[in-house]
Amino acid sequence: MQKNHKACPKCGSEMHRQSSMCRNCYEEERAKPDSYITKECPVCSNEFTVHKAQIERGQGKYCSRSCARSGSPTKKRKRAMLECGYCGDMFEKHKSEIKKNVGDVHFCSPNCWYSYNQRENHYLWSGGQHERLSPEGREWRGKVIERDKGFCRICHSQENLEVHHIVRFGKNKNKRWDIDNGITLCFECHKKFRRIEEEYEDELELMASVPVVVWNV
């Protein structure tokens, strides 16, 4: 027996806890036959009884909830048939979900979404590691470190040096290999700017524009 149900005190059949007796017992003992009308369900063609008061309220059109939902015209209007951008299968999607979709490509499952949104298809794709490690990228890093005399511009360490893009790598392709868009940082200082690069663009750009002076004592 379900949690929200109990046994009918008359016949012992399962019923809802808020009811004093099951529907069959109620119709036999208390229901007035003149108050009910027999109708035919427009979906499954089964006959069912409905109270006159329900008909006056515009209810009692279907024999069950499943038939009511399948016959509802609003269900068809709120969904649209789309073609999956990865596998090509046709599928239904709610119009509210279509409005929230990023881009014009739709997918029938999370697996198709993941398979499609790889490399250049992903909206955050910035070229990948193969472009960062290109000969042009290696030359750019060498020139930035040479300009900064081999020192981290924050803690002045000369170990574990890396070159940081002041304007993010994927944000502006024209500045990607611009020496003025790079600054030398050690590993520990570099990781402090991860995911917050845009907040410190102006400060790092000013710091990189100041020449490094090394005093030989």
Image (cartoon, helix red, strand yellow):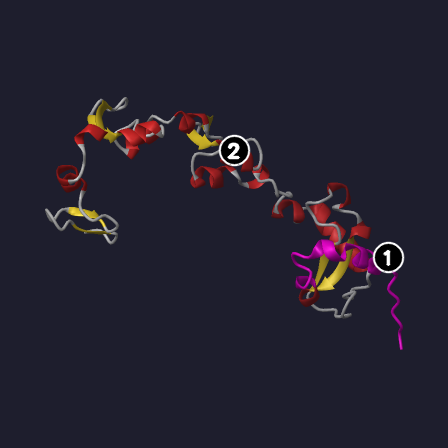
Tell me where residue 50 appears, x and y as whole percent: 24, 30
Q: Are discs 2 and 1 less than 8 Å apart at CB?
A: no
Callout 2 crowding tier (Cα within 10 Å): few <14, some 14–19, many ≥20: some
CA distance for labels 2 and 1: 47 Å
Residue 36 falls in image quadrant: top left
* In the displayed structure image, the side of residue 99 where residue 92 appears, left or right: left
**Residue located 75% across and 53% down the image:** 166
Q: Earlier in the sequence, mark 2 or mark 1?
A: 2
Query: Which residue position is annotated with label 1?
Result: 209
Tell me: 4 left or right of 116: left
Question: Of the residues shown, which amino acid type is indicated by label 1?
Answer: Ser
- Residue pictured at 17% horizontal, 44% vertical: 22
- Callout 1: helix, strand or loop? helix
Look at the numbered disc 2 and give the secondary structure of its residue: helix
Residue 73, quarter of picture: top left
Residue 102 horizontal/vertical position (percent): 57, 37
Q: State which region is magenta.
A: 190-217
User: Where in the figure is residue 132, as x and y percent of width and height?
Assistant: 66, 48
Lateral position of residue 49 relative to residue 161, left or right: left
For badge 2, the amino acid type reads Ile
Tell me, yes or no, if residue 61 can be seen here: yes
Residue 44, how many percent across, how many down? Answer: 24, 24
Quadrant of the drawing holding the C terminus: bottom right
Foreground pick, 147 / 85: 85
